[in-house]
Image (cartoon, rainbow, N blue to C red):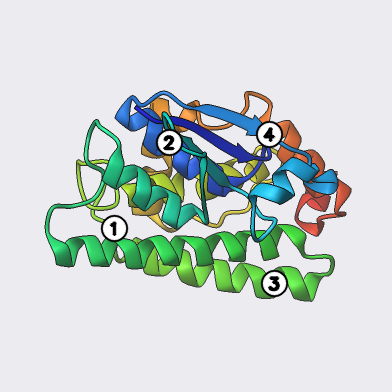
Amino acid sequence: MSKLTLISFPTCPFVQRAVIALKEKGVPFDVVYIDLANKPDWFLALSPLGKVPVLKVERDGKEPAIVFESAVILEYLEETTPGARLHPEDALDRAQHRSWIEFGSQLLGDIWRYSAAKDQAELDGAREGLLAKLTRLEATIVGPFFAGDTFSLVDAVYAPAFRQLDAIESAVQTGLTDNLPKISAWRRALASRPSVKDAAPADFVDLYLNRLRGNDALVLKAAA
């Protein structure tokens, strides 16, 4: 069996996707965290885009192979590792799940804009965009997970996004999902799942909030 090593930084939501998938499958792996502000030369030699996450695959008798971009990493893990299948069997269902995985990446972008806003106009605009996507999700998900009772890669993708919202709401109440009961229940179901709980460092909330404070995030000012 190949040796798998994920390379990322401690608060990266994209590497958490792969960690969740591997834990769901019960596949052994290692995680190596780097400092994004001071990327080591060995990492830049591995990553063509200089971005995380990167998956290093080591196989007997062969040079290590590098897979980058989180959605591609998820697909590779789904195709090559044992354990529970996390994509639907039906081709159309799989295509729809992949579409909502891309939507999840866009949602993370909205959360980043929301958390990075420096003035009220930026914050209000980011909140509006974020609420629009969450409302669309509310009308789409089945519950308790994205497509019903079965945990899928789509769930692995959204769990890190909700972890960021959970971290923000540990400091200040946003009310973003107060009127979205299916999203709220989905957040709780994901947060309580062992693979999700263990997908980030134990001090994730402190690391994430300190990062926002260091960027002078307006969203946290209400908690000051």
Which of discs 3 and 1 lies nearer the camera? The answer is 1
User: Which amino acid type is marked by label 3?
Assistant: Asp
Which amino acid lies under the numbered mark 2 shown in the image of this protein? Ile
Q: Amino acid at mark 4?
A: Tyr
Q: Nearer the viewer, mark 1 or mark 4?
A: 4
State the residue position of label 4: 33
Task: Kindly identify which residue carries mark 3.
Answer: 124
Does residue 192 appear in the picture of this structure? no
Q: Residue 141 shows which numbered tag?
A: 1
Crowd tier of the residue under label 2, counting other residues whose Cα lies within 10 Å: few below 14, some 14–19, many 20 or above: many
Q: Mark 1 or mark 4: name the one nearer the start of the chain.
A: 4
Q: Residue at x 23, y 52 (%)?
A: 147
Q: Amino acid at mark 1?
A: Ile
Mark before the other along the chain sequence, 3 or 2: 2
Identify the residue at horizontal 75%, vertical 73% (top origin): 122
The residue most toward the front is 61
Q: Earlier in the sequence, mark 4 or mark 3?
A: 4
> Please, is residue 150 above or below residue 51 in the view?
above
Q: Which residue is mark 2?
A: 20
Q: Reading the chain from its start, which is encountered first: label 3 or label 1?
A: 3
- Single out the mark in the foreground, 4 or 3: 4
